């Protein structure tokens, strides 16, 4: 009898251990790390098949980005958001981040997320301003506000509602997920002492700022980030604006031009948004939508803090390399601002959506100015 009890006990223990092992193996198989190993790398095809999952598996949404995941802030914050969401949802809601031109060519991302072929896109809204110039005002605005004022308009001045309405016309839900500090005013091969010095310059510039500065006689040369250095170094262009000092340093522009100008009048702060297909967004539970909004809110905080800290070290390094860090003269800034107001008037006439958003944005800034002037040191 004692022997039978012993055998039965061993069998029971063995059964329990096997059960625990099976559960552990199942959990390991479902872990993000395991899925990353099992999932094949995305092919270079333009339209991959939709992700299909057996019941009970986590929701995995495809997230495309026109910026590499290694790009400071604009790319790294996408990776940070993905990691935070996986943790906050306990692995039940995840984004799978794809590198540029993987799910689709960058130029096609807007259409793909609009029609649901891609679940979401990580981008600045101005990347798609050709569809609606109002998108400029939800990304970065020449002579615009610092981050705190920009966020105040979005959250409490009606900006988010207008942003939702603008993107809803394209079947997209926008969630602001990163905010960047000011960019530089650009790298120049020679000094700029007056607005006259801008005339005839060949300059790499993007976005609505290009339209503003072109009215002062600058010839705009659109170039991707990888082509700017060689064009500037060879003299094919005379100047270039690109990004934040930390990012510019990484591209080595200090070896191509010795005059680094500030301020970044065209981008005092820049919003990066998570643009989600509306059907996908509405298919999520209220709790899942709340998680995405909360995680993006924390990523805004992280990007603001990290972005400010990065520029301090970058400027110190740039200065040690013999670059002259300069400030654009007041007459140049005055001419640029006058040109911007002209662009606003032109766009308000041609696009009622732009005018509606501008009136909200500009009205909030006018009211806020009293608090800014009283509450903050000049």
Image (cartoon, helix red, strand yellow):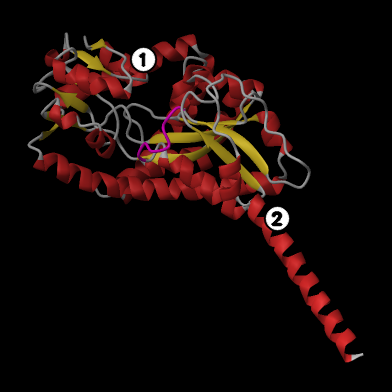
Span highlighted in magenta in the image: 66-72
Asked if residue 61 shows in the view, the reply is: yes
For the view shown, which residue lies furthest in the right direction?
A: 1
Query: In this figure, which residue is indicated by the disc labeled 1?
Result: 343
Q: Secondary structure at mark 1?
A: helix
214 over 22 or under it: above or below: above
Instruction: Point out residue 367 in the picture as x, y percentages from the top left corner.
Output: 42, 37
Main SS category, magenta section: loop
Instruction: Point out residue 353 in the picture as x, y percentages from the top left corner.
Output: 53, 18
Image depth: mark 2 or mark 1 in front: 2
Q: Report the number of numbered marks.
A: 2
Which of pointers 2 and 1 lies earlier in the amino acid sequence? Answer: 2
Instruction: Point out residue 343 in the picture as x, y percentages from the top left corner.
Output: 36, 15
Question: Within 10 Å of the Cα at label 2, are there few (<14), some (14-19), or many (20+) other Cα atoms?
Answer: few
366 over 14 or under it: above or below: above
Please state which of residues 92 and 280 is positioned toward the viewer in this rendering. Answer: 92
Q: CA distance from mark 2 to mark 1?
A: 59 Å
Query: In this figure, which residue is indicated by the disc labeled 2?
Result: 26
Q: Is residue 210 left or right of residue 14?
A: left
């Amino acid at each position: 009898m004692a022997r039978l009890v012993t055998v039965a006990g061993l069998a029971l223990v063995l059964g329990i251990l096997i059960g625990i092992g099976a559960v552990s193996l199942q959990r390991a198989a479902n872990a993000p790390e395991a899925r990353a190993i099992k999932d094949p790398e995305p092919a270079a095809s333009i339209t991959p098949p939709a992700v299909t999952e057996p019941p009970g598996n986590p929701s995995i949404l495809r997230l495309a980005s026109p910026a590499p995941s290694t790009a400071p802030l604009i790319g790294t914050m996408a990776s940070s958001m993905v990691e935070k969401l996986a943790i906050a949802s306990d692995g039940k809601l995840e984004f799978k981040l794809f590198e540029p031109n993987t799910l689709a060519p960058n130029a096609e991302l807007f259409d793909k997320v609009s029609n649901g072929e891609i679940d979401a896109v990580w981008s600045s809204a101005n990347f798609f301003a050709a569809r609606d110039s109002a998108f400029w005002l939800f990304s970065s605005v020449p002579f615009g506000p610092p981050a705190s004022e920009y966020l105040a308009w979005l959250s409490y001045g009606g900006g988010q509602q207008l942003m939702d309405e603008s993107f809803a016309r394209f079947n997209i839900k926008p969630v602001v997920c990163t905010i960047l500090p000011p960019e530089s005013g650009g790298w120049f091969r020679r000094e700029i002492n007056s607005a006259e010095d801008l005339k005839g310059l060949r300059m790499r510039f993007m976005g609505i700022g290009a339209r503003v500065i072109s009215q002062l006689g600058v010839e705009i040369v659109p170039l991707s980030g990888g082509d700017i250095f060689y064009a500037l170094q060879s003299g094919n262009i005379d100047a270039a604006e690109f990004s934040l000092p930390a990012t510019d340093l990484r591209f080595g522009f200090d070896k191509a031009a010795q005059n680094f100008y500030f301020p970044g009048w065209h981008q005092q702060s820049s919003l990066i948004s998570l643009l989600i297909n509306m059907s996908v967004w509405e298919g999520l539970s209220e709790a899942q939508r709340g998680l995405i909004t909360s995680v993006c809110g924390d990523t805004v905080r992280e990007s603001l803090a990290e972005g400010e800290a990065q520029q301090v070290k970058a400027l110190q390094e740039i200065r040690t390399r013999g670059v002259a860090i300069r400030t654009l003269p007041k007459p140049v800034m005055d001419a640029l601002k006058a040109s911007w107001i002209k662009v606003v008037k032109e766009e308000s006439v041609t696009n009622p959506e732009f005018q509606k958003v501008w009136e909200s944005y500009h009205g909030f800034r006018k009211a806020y100015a009293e608090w800014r002037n009283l509450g903050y040191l000049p």
